[in-house]
Amino acid sequence: MKIIILAQENDNHTAPIKWALENAGYQVACWGGLSWNEMQQASLLLSDETKVTLGLHTVEPGDVVWIRRPDPPVHNPKVSESDRKFAELEYRCFYHSIAYILETLPVWCVNKYSAARFINNKAIQLHIARSCGLNVPVALMSNAPSRVRNFFAQKTNRTICKAFTPHVWTRESGLGVAVTETFELTREMLPPDEVLTYAPGIYQDMVVKQFDVRTVLMGNRVYSYALHNPLKALDWRQDAGQGKIEVRVIATPSDVEQGIQAFAQKSGICFGSLDFAVDANDQWWFLEVNEQGQFLWLDQFDRNIKMQEKFCAFITAPKGSTQSLEEREGLFPSFAEYEKFVEKLESPPVPAAAPGSPYLSIEA
């Protein structure tokens, strides 16, 4: 068995997990996604035995394929301008063929591509979560100004606005960023109708919360962590990035855990990071799930969480194993040990940036 990670080797989760697995004696291969260069080329042989080759690596029965964050397909830049759109479409269709066929092979995909595409949709997430018995705030998704204004006109609860996807605008120099964040919005604050059509938005009842919870799903195991933000920010992510939150292990209420397991079964995912808000009555409210969300940062706040070790134990667990992840986590080095390893490596200097550089829009 080998673990094939669909992501660039320097991805912030791929690198430490790959290091930990290899230190535990596992064979790990990375494939950054479909492209024209040799290391990212791919082949799909359809015969009596279907074979998939990703770069230099052949997918074999019993392998684990972690579909972490592969780059979008990239065609050869030398293709003529008149053929560019055709090449882009061919590369995209070929990648979809590879990603979908992987889940038909005798390998374990974390997560299946079909499930990932299905659940990476905010409307589907909220709909399924509600059907599984989880508390879900009332929400409107729209780019129609009349519908948005009517939604606010009927509201007595406080309301928030959020984007469908994370996004970061950064200067070409690398200095200075602007990030999409959840924010409170009132009827009086609504912009002119035309502005409401610039980008669709998610308008949702605000959960007046005691604290947030990040829950990590790994198969039949659910791990929850309370996030206490002394700054009481509506969106904790920016403060977490600056180390300004407190992370504490918290028990997942049995009804919430049952709802999460039902959610996983309906959506088809076996792994993901879920966000909840806990109100003054200790009710947990489902906010969203990211099937390949960040999780190793939890180890930086509390070394006893052992998220890196648990994930390695999860994706290497033998089929049919009855061992818990806690029983196997000792087989793998910790994230703290990885950080010590990285400290020994020489880092190239960061070039000085020119002030006043324009912003460059990139996806988070």
Image (cartoon, rainbow, N blue to C red):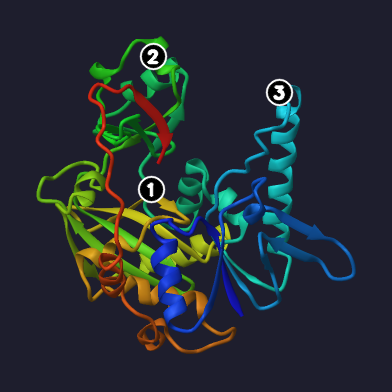
CA–CA distance between discs 1 and 3?
Answer: 48 Å
Kind of element beneath mark 1: loop
**Residue depth check, mark 1 versus mark 3: number of the one nearer the observer:** 3
Q: Position of residue 156 (x, y in %)?
A: 25, 30
Residue that carries the numbered disc 3 in the rendered image: 81
Residue at left offset 31%, top offset 51%: 348
Where in the figure is residue 80, as x and y percent of width and height? 73, 26
Q: Is residue 9 above or below residue 218?
A: above
The amino acid type found where label 3 is placed reads Glu
Q: Which residue is mark 2?
A: 195
Ranked by sequence position, the earlier of labels 1 and 2 is 1
Residue 152, image x, y percentages: 32, 24
Viewer-closest of 33 and 184: 33
Q: Nearer the viewer, residue 124 or 132?
A: 124
Tell me whether circle 1 and circle 3 mark residues in contact (CB < 8 Å): no
Q: As drawn, which residue projects farthest toward the left?
A: 230
Q: Which one is earlier in the sequence, the residue at label 1 or at label 3?
A: 3
Q: Nearer the viewer, mark 1 or mark 2?
A: 2
Q: Nearer the viewer, residue 279 or 267?
A: 267
